Image (cartoon, rainbow, N blue to C red):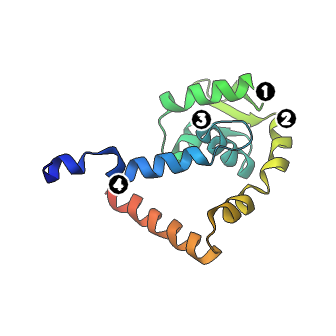
Amino acid sequence: MDQDCQNLKLENQLCFLIYSTNLALTPLGITYPQYLVMLVLWEKDEITVSEIGSKLFLESSTLTPILKKLEALQLLNRTRSKEDERQVIITLSEKGKKLKEQAVNIPKHILEASSCDTATLLGLKDQLTQLRTNIAK
């Protein structure tokens, strides 16, 4: 098999490795993208869809179905802004706020499951941040 074909094998794809690692991190009975939205809301409640999209590098069209599903799970509320009806404001529901209590130990569990020390994981995080920055240029 020539090198070009080898480069296209799924097992040789960095993007697939990152994606499949994300799948292994599915916590709390919600999908990984839903978890990311919840992380944003736990940092700052009452935020616009566009602000969430900016933090997660997602377009509103991608984010909207995720938000609708989280609303159906009663983890958040979506309401139109009174100042600008084009904007949708996302707020945590009581159930969404309580879910944060379950999420608090997730980083510790990931550290334990990874069999890596904190410095190794922080180094990996820094490398992935640099990779994302380089690719996005």
Q: Residue, x 44% and y 51% (percent of image)? A: 17
Q: Residue, x 87% and y 35% (percent of image)? A: 94
Q: Is residue 111 above or below residue 5?
A: below
Are discs 4 and 1 less than 8 Å apart at CB? no
Sequence-wise first label, 3 or 4: 3
Label 1 Cα neighbours within 10 Å, binned few <14 / some 14-19 / many ≥20: some
Q: Amino acid at mark 3?
A: Val
Sequence-wise first label, 4 or 1: 1
Name the residue tied to disc 3.
49
- Distance from Cα at disc 4 to Cα at disc 1: 34 Å
Number of the label disc, if any, that sits on residue 136: 4
The image quadrant of residue 122 is: bottom right
Residue that sits furthest to the front in the current view: 1
Are discs 1 and 3 less than 8 Å apart at CB? no
Say whether residue 29 is visible.
yes
Helix, strand or loop for disc 4: helix
In the rendering, at what x and y percent does residue 108 appear? Answer: 74, 63
Label 4 Cα neighbours within 10 Å, binned few <14 / some 14-19 / many ≥20: few
Are discs 2 and 1 less than 8 Å apart at CB? yes
Name the residue tied to disc 1.
74
Sequence-wise first label, 3 or 2: 3
Are discs 3 and 2 less than 8 Å apart at CB? no
Would you say 101 lies left or right of 41 here?
right
Sequence-wise first label, 2 or 1: 1
Sequence-wise first label, 2 or 4: 2
Would you say 126 lies left or right of 4 here?
right
Name the residue tied to disc 2.
95
In the rendering, at what x and y percent does residue 36 appear? Answer: 62, 45
- Distance from Cα at disc 3 to Cα at disc 4: 22 Å
- Distance from Cα at disc 3 to Cα at disc 2: 20 Å
